Image (spheres, grey):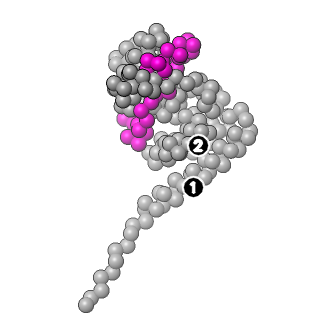
Amino acid sequence: MKRSEFELLLREAGALCRESDFIVFGSQAVLGWLEKPPRSLLVSFEADLYPRNHPAAAILIRPRLGLNSPFHRQHGFYADSVTPELATFPDGWTDRLIPFSNQNTGGVTAWCVEIHDITVSKLAAGRPKDVRYILALLRHKLIAVKMLRERIDLLPSESDQRRLHAGFDELLKEFRRRQRAKKVKPTKPVRRKK
C-alpha cells in the first residue's frame, strides 16, 4: 500500500463513519511512522483500522471499504475493521500512538501503533507474513532489540512473555544467520592451465 492509498482510505473511512480519528494497528501503521518506508514493509493490501472515539461505527467499514467490497475491487486495497483487542499488545500501547495526518487525509488523523508495539503483536501472531515483516524491520534497523525485549516484558501474561522472548530469540538467530550468509562471498573456481 502506498501513502496516497493510505490517505484515500483514511478519507473514505472518515466520511463513512463520520469520524476524524482512527487507530491503525496493522503493518501499514508504518506509513504513519516513516516518511519513506522500505518497500518490503508495504506489501500488504489492507490497513487495519477502527474509529477511535466511536468503535461501534467499525461495522460500517467492512461492507463499504473491506475485503471484496466495491472499494476494494475498484482500488485493489481495503480496510479491515477488526478491533485491536484481537491483537496482543504490551501494556501502555495506547499512550505511545503516533498521529499521522496531512492535507490529503481530509481532516482525519490516523493514530498509528508504535513500531515496537506492532512488532510484539506480530511476534504473538507468528504467521509467515508476520515473520517476514519482523525480519524486514530488523534488516532496515527500524527496531531496537533492547526496546523490543522491554515491550515484551510489558505483556500482562508471563507465559506470553516467555513464549515471545523465545520466539524472538529464534528469529534473531535466523536473522543473524542470514546476515552472515550474505557477507560470505562465493569463491571463484580456480582455472587450471592446460
Q: Nearer the viewer, residue 96 or 157?
A: 157
User: In the picture, residue 34 is in which quadrant?
Assistant: top left
Disc 1: which residue: 173
- Three-letter amino acid code of the residue under disc 2: Gly
Give the residue drawn at x 38%, y 40%.
39
Number of marks: 2
Q: Secondary structure at mark 2?
A: loop
Tell me: residue 92, above or below residue 192.
above
CA neighbours of label 2 inside 10 A, class few (<14), some (14 to 19), many (20+):
some
Which label was assigned to residue 163? none
The N terminus lies in quadrant: top left
Q: Residue furthest top?
A: 18
The segment highlighted magenta reads 36-65
Q: Position of residue 176 (x, y in %)?
A: 52, 56
Q: Is residue 38 magenta?
A: yes
Q: Residue furthest left?
A: 194
Q: Position of residue 140 (x, y in %)?
A: 44, 45
Q: Is residue 94 magenta?
A: no
Give the residue drawn at x 57%, y 33%.
117
Q: Is residue 148 visible?
A: no
Give the residue drawn at x 58%, y 43%.
126
Q: Nearer the viewer, residue 45 or 131?
A: 45
Q: Nearer the viewer, residue 70 or 5?
A: 70
Label 2 vs 1, first from the N-terminus: 2
Which label was assigned to residue 126? 2
Quick check: marks 2 and 1 in contact, CB under 8 Å?
no
Judge depth for marks 2 and 1 and give the one in front.
2
Q: Position of residue 43 (x, y in %)?
A: 41, 38
Q: Position of residue 22 (x, y in %)?
A: 50, 18
- Three-letter amino acid code of the residue under disc 1: Lys
Q: Secondary structure at mark 1?
A: helix
User: In the picture, residue 2 is in which quadrant?
Assistant: top left
